[in-house]
Image: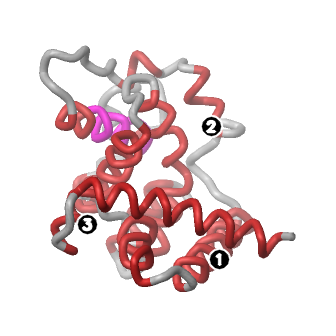
Amino acid sequence: MTDEELVELALNGGYERATNIIYAKYAAVIGSYLSHYIKDDFELEDVVQETFIKAFHQLDKFDPGKSRSLPDSQDSMRSWLFEIAKNTSLDHRDKNERKLPSASQLGSDSSADEHEGNGDVSAMSPEDELIISQRKERIEKAINGLSDLYRDVAKMCLIDYLGYKEIADKLDIPLNTVKTRIRRARDLITKIMNSEEE
């Protein structure tokens, strides 16, 4: 499916499936883009999550014919997400720190391209969709196996794509507690999934 088809699907009853695919396609490249300027792992994860939350909340504003920062590219979704990521990152940082470059300056960034495989991010095979679906099921199963202490934060972060601050507000717990629990939950989920593969 093309990005335009995924947006159409999201807006017409297939929101969860479409947003999961968009996230799977672009999370790595957005993380790579931001990692050049955000060195703190917690902040990086937070900004990536918040980028997609903001994007998914305004999918109706996505214009596939308007590539803001990559003038000769058909990859308007990538460009659009870069702009949201840049603005989200700047919201997290002091104004005195250096600004992120625009997506056009990263148009030939090999480190970002490395995360895109063959560079064709506008289409995903049925096999890829199946793998994503199966991985999501495995993650959900692993999350359900966590203790109460970690289960709620893991669901909010990894399934609902909520940002750390939003999770902290919803659960009425300190932000640092949320970060610690999510980090621990990720470790536990990884161990559970690795043990299943053995």
Can you name the residue that lies furthest to the right here?
A: 198
Three-letter residue code for mark 1: Arg
Mark in the foreground, 2 or 3: 3
Residue 64 against residue 136 in the figure, above or below: above
Residue 47 located within the stretch drawn in magenta: no
Return the x and y of residue 74 as percentages of the image width and height. 48, 36
Residue 21 against residue 42 in the figure, above or below: below
Distance from disc 2 to disc 1, alpha carbons, whole Å, reads 23 Å
Image quarter of residue 121: top right
Residue position marked by numbered label 2 in the rendering: 115
Viewer-nearest residue: 178 or 135: 178
Q: Circle 3 — which element?
A: helix
Mark in the foreground, 1 or 3: 3
Crowding near pointer 1: few (<14 within 10 Å), some, many (20+)? Answer: some
Query: Which numbered tag is attached to residue 179?
Result: none
Residue 51 against residue 163 in the figure, above or below: above
Residue position marked by numbered label 3 in the rendering: 167
Residue at point 37%, 71% (across, down): 153
Indicate left or right for 115 with 160 as reference.
right
Q: Circle 1 — which element?
A: helix
Residue position marked by numbered label 1 in the rendering: 138
Viewer-nearest residue: 90 or 73: 90
Three-letter residue code for mark 3: Ile
- Residue numbers of the magenta segment: 77-86
Instruction: Give the mark nearest the N terminus, 2 or 1.
Output: 2
